[in-house]
Image (cartoon, coloured by chain):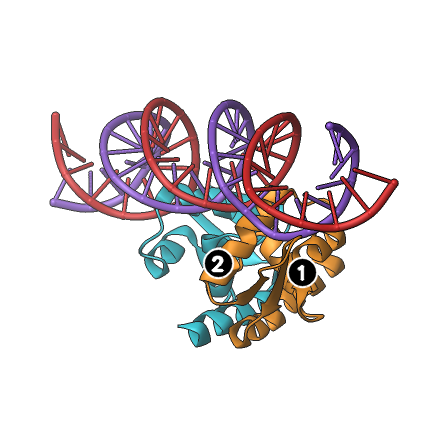
Chain colours: A orange, B cyan, C purple, D red
Amino acid sequence: MTLIGSKWKVLLLQNLRDGRQRYGELKRRLPDISEKMLIHELKQLVEAGLVTKHAYPEIPPRVEYELTANGQQALPVVDSIIAFGRQYL
Amino acid sequence: MTLIGSKWKVLLLQNLRDGRQRYGELKRRLPDISEKMLIHELKQLVEAGLVTKHAYPEIPPRVEYELTANGQQALPVVDSIIAFGRQYL
DNA sequence: TCAGGTACCTACCCAGAGGTAAGAAACACT
DNA sequence: AGTGTTTCTTACCTCTGGGTAGGTACCTGA
């Protein structure tokens, strides 16, 4: 629960399933997340080893996030949560 | 996430899968939960329609909790969370 | 020179998860 | 009279998820 048990972590994993994506792209795909939470949750996912961060020393900066193998293993959880949510509503 | 996204709700659903159980029994099966949280989380599960409460007007009181049909549908989520947790550790 | 984009960080606020500790109602049994 | 059993309740504390709002660094392009 500590690793993936929050509203935004589930949605981030769900979005990252489509492959490596940069910060701004995630922000666009989750219009309602605040920048603070986006950074914060991404950082925790990286610390948990579910996501890797690729930072390119360019100007303007470019940072990409990608699921790790462990992150892939979390996708079934995300799926079942989303399936339950849809069916419950 | 609001419905089942907490440490103890997952474990309560997991324990209630074995059938209707009374308060004291759940308390024994989850030795680390505080009484406050046990009552609180059970109440929320009841409000969410995942669990039903059967109270018998006896002395000493007897109260039993049981999964509803919606509660049963949440079990796959619980399973995948627990499976992920085990494998991750 | 100045607006703009990109990926952050900071301070402040609120609600809820979770813990500890104590007590309450009601009867049974010694 | 007192102790125990069972299901809660209440008060107080801390930590974190989540939001709003604003600021920072660096370069690009008009």
Is D11 situated above or below C19? above
Is D6 situated above or below B72? above
Q: Is residue A17 left or right of residue C26?
A: right
Rendered residue at 69%/71% (across/down): A19
The image shows residue C2 at horizontal and vertical percentages of 75, 28
Which of the 4 quarters of the picture holds residue D4?
Answer: top left
Q: Which mark is residue A22?
A: 1
- Crowdedness near tag 1: few (<14), some (14–19) or many (≥20) residues, C-alpha within 10 Å: some
**Chain letter for the residue marked with disc 2 in the picture:** A
Callout 1 amino acid: Arg
The image shows residue A4 at horizontal and vertical percentages of 53, 59
Rendered residue at 69%/56% (across/down): A26
Tell me whether circle 2 and circle 1 mark residues in contact (CB < 8 Å): no
The image shows residue A69 at horizontal and vertical percentages of 54, 77
Which of the 4 quarters of the picture holds residue B27?
Answer: bottom left
Q: Which mark is residue A1?
A: 2
Viewer-nearest residue: A58 or A9: A58
* Mark with earlier residue (2, 1): 2
**Chain letter for the residue marked with disc 1 in the picture:** A
Is A17 situated above or below A25? below
